[in-house]
Image (tube, rainbow, N blue to C red):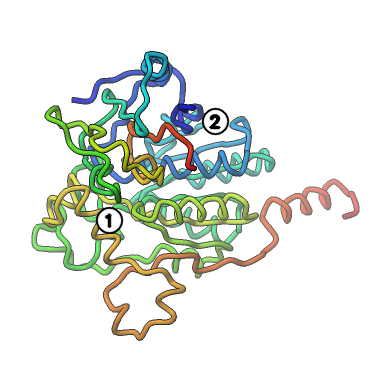
Amino acid sequence: MITMHPSFEMLRPGKKFPTVWCPGCGHGIVQGAIIRAVQKLGIPRDQMVMVSGIGCSSRMPVYVDFNSLHTAHGRAIAFATGVKLHNPKLHVIVITGDGDALAIGGNHFIHAARRNVELTVILLNNNIYGMTGGQYSPTTPIGKRASTAPYGTAERDFDPCALAVAAGAVFAARGTVFGVVELEKMIQQALAKRGFALVEALSPCPTLYGRLNREGNAVKMIQWQKENTINAKAAAKLPPEKTAGKIITGVFHDAEVTPYTEVYQGIIDKAQGQKQ
Amino acid sequence: MAKNTTVEAARAEIERDFQAGYDLPVYVYKPWCKSCEICVALCPKRVLEMGEDRKPVVARPADCIQCRMCELHCPDLAVFVTKEKG
């Protein structure tokens, strides 16, 4: 028995493929993981809304056959909050990049986490502004080169997961495209979560970040992820010198807090004079 | 170069190949392949190899263990495993 690609049914009909992303870009791998996570949870496509801002990653809603919203730079979370409040039954996924979520949309990001709006935010972190030509972003590690930092950036980088947890998110996890199976499980957990859930997906940019920092082609960058990331559970058992300089992956935070739409419904009921 | 086609066209083309008796464990839909070589590099059994047209070819079909590493890591949904495990 020979079978067709299991993800084809979730692709947008009539849209021309392949995607706009460069050869070896990790964003397509994350897209595959999202498709499989939605398929495994059995969420109907009509109940999925994919909202994105601007950037390489934000091209994704064009290719996946969900309800979609491609919005202004950095404002994806703001639009998504509106969608979720209007119809809390919808599953709202926000696709955003490191620059989109943490620089231009930094305030939307922390305040949505503070309010605990039920959004699944997938932050595709490629450490650079890819679409506009390789400027350094809030997650470019200190000392790494970008087109606007030819001698290396002098700024420290954000840890998006720690930022989200500090702001009040109920779920924060970091995965890699090398560990796409774990990433898919994290996305499944995040989708099932009632509250602001962040999944940071480390996605290599071989065309700009890789070339400017001489990190090699897509294959080398994916293998770098294998060698330089360590799971939080494994890292906890190792002495600190063995985990120094490595990126920790895994689920960092998983809490239960009353979601915003539920609190807000309480306000609506009160205002309309109904007893809770 | 990758060639632009819709998912409907891709599905029809692949199904035609299946009906013509395609029997390899991995299928490479070449119009969507961007020659990034990730599938070739991540296959634990070296089933795939880069062909002369810079697209992967199924060089050692008998060695495939259906681990789906190629399928899961292909950014362009161009490679997939055609047979179930077991």
Return the disc, 2 or 1, that comes first in the chain's sequence.
Answer: 2
Q: Is residue A203 left or right of residue A169?
A: left
Instruction: Give the residue at x 29% y 20%.
Output: B4
The residue where tag 2 is placed is A67
The amino acid pointed to by label 2 is Asn
Most extreme residue toward the front, as rendered? B62
Q: Is residue A184 left or right of residue A205?
A: right
Q: Chain of mark 1?
A: A
Q: Quarter of the image for the C terminus of chain A: give it.
A: bottom right
Instruction: Give the residue at x 37% y 33%.
Output: B25
Q: Chain of mark 2?
A: A
Q: In the rendered view, tell whether residue A149 sits above or below residue A241.
A: above
The disc label shown at residue B52, or none = none
Q: Nearer the viewer, residue A275 or A39?
A: A39
Q: Nearer the viewer, residue A217 or A167?
A: A217
Percent of width and height locating residue B51: 16, 32
Most extreme residue toward the right, as rendered? A275
The Cα atoms of the two marked residues, 2 and 1, are separated by 28 Å
Instruction: Give the residue at x 20% y 38%.
Output: B49
Q: Residues within 10 Å of mark 1 (few under 14, many from 20)?
A: many
Q: Nearer the viewer, residue A261 or A204?
A: A204
Instruction: Give the residue at x 25% y 52%.
Output: A128
Q: In the rendered view, tell whether residue A141 sits above or below residue A105.
A: below
Q: Secondary structure at mark 1?
A: loop
Percent of width and height locating residue A182: 46, 56
The disc label shown at residue A127, or none = 1
Q: In the rendered view, tell whether residue A9 sits above or below residue A183.
A: above
Figure disc tally: 2
The amino acid pointed to by label 1 is Asn
Quadrant of residue B39 within the rendered picture = top left
